[in-house]
Image (cartoon, helix red, strand yellow):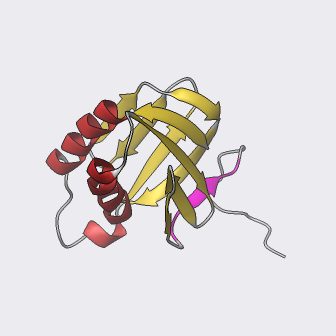
Amino acid sequence: MKAIVAKPNLYDHRNIIKTAKPDRSILNRVLLRMTVSERFSVVGPGFEHPIDCETLEWGTITVPYVTCNKLLQSLKFMPGNTVTIAADNGQIRLDTLKTNHPDIMVTPRDRTPISLFQG
């Protein structure tokens, strides 16, 4: 998954995430699903937010809510008007800022959340 997104669009998304903040008791278990196709779509508990983007690579990932929130808070320190978002299993990158977390997972193209045949 890889896309270029305008920073004002991500600021709007940050406000939506703050508004839809889950209860503190489940906060560390909540995952957000991010999909890049023609648009960049973020789905969480109680919201879906489409964001205009320039798509570089289609894909879907799941990211912990807390990790996503921390990344969005770091936007104000990043130069430029656009941000390149890219992800692989275990990591997400905003331009040169890279965050590792074992719960960041790329969903395979067949949309199964995990591999059914682990060898």
Q: Height in image: 15 above or below 114?
A: above
Q: Position of residue 98 (x, y in %)?
A: 51, 62
Q: Position of residue 4 (x, y in %)?
A: 51, 34
Q: Quadrant of the N terminus?
A: top right
Q: Position of residue 113 (x, y in %)?
A: 61, 56
Q: Position of residue 63 (x, y in %)?
A: 45, 58
- What residue sits 55% from the left and 51% below the top? 61
- Residue 9 falls within the magenta-colored stretch: no
Residue 109 located left or right of residue 39: right
- What residue sits 62% from the left and 41% below the top? 59
Camera-nearest residue between 54 and 36: 54
- Residue 106 falls within the magenta-colored stretch: yes
Q: Tell which residue pokes out farthest to the front in this image.
A: 79
Camera-nearest residue between 7 and 100: 7
- What residue sits 58% from the left and 45% below the top? 60
Q: Height in image: 19 above or below 100?
A: above
Q: Quadrant of the C terminus?
A: bottom right
Write the start and end of the magenta stretch as one range: 103-108
- What residue sits 31% from the left and 61% below the top? 70
Quadrant hosting residue 80: top left
